[in-house]
Image: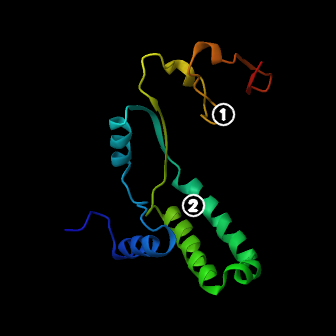
Amino acid sequence: MPVIGLRPEDLIWGLFMSKYIFPGADASLPLSDVVKGLEKAGFEIHSAENVSVHYGLTIQRWHQNWQKNERAIMSTYGQRWYRLWHLFLAWSWRIAMQGNAACFQVVAHKNLDHFDRKVFVGHQSLGGVRAPERERDRVPLTTSTNGTAHAE
């Protein structure tokens, strides 16, 4: 019995990617499998965020750049390579935007007693937040008048 929500084109897409784009890779792992693997490896999950739309927009830009550079790509890699990646990029951003492919950002850390779990408190975005391994590695942060944090 097929997985609920799995459509024939999803299988075709997976086979295409496996054969021509990322041989041996599996980009269709459910988030639960990834989290289970991380936990078995001793990681503690801090957060998981669905970034599919953001990634879809990124791939759309890559596709636009690919098309803009068609002549250079064709002269360097040939028509077959250009067409394979043209199809891959075009299909990728479309399925990401319609919700048929999910992309998650998982923030995790080794589950160690000495890890300072308060490091993420007060941050709206995790970009640029680095969890120090030791107390002496800690960089004091101050907040500027515009509300951004920066190292002293």
SS state under label 2: helix
Q: Which mark is residue 56?
A: 2
Tell me if residue 55 comes above or below residue 141 in the rendering: below
Tell me if residue 29 comes above or below residue 43 in the rendering: below
N-term-proximal mark, 2 vs 1: 2
Between 55 and 73, the one lying in front of the other is: 73
Q: CA distance from mark 2 to mark 1?
A: 23 Å
Residue sticking out furthest to the right? 145
Between 99 and 2, the one lying in front of the other is: 2
Q: Position of residue 81 (x, y in %)?
A: 61, 80
**Amino acid type, callout 2:** Gly
Q: Which mark is residue 47?
A: none
| Residue for badge 1 | 128
Residue at point 32%, 64% (across, down): 5
Tell me if residue 51 comes above or below residue 114 in the rendering: below
SS state under label 1: loop
Residue at point 72%, 79% (across, down): 76
* Quadrant in which the C terminus appears: top right
Residue at point 75%, 75% (across, down): 68
Q: Quick one: label 2, few (<14), some, or many (20+) residues within 10 Å?
A: many
Query: How many labels were placed on the picture?
Result: 2
Would you say 92 lies left or right of 29 here? right
Would you say 60 lies left or right of 33 here? right
Residue at point 36%, 53% (across, down): 30
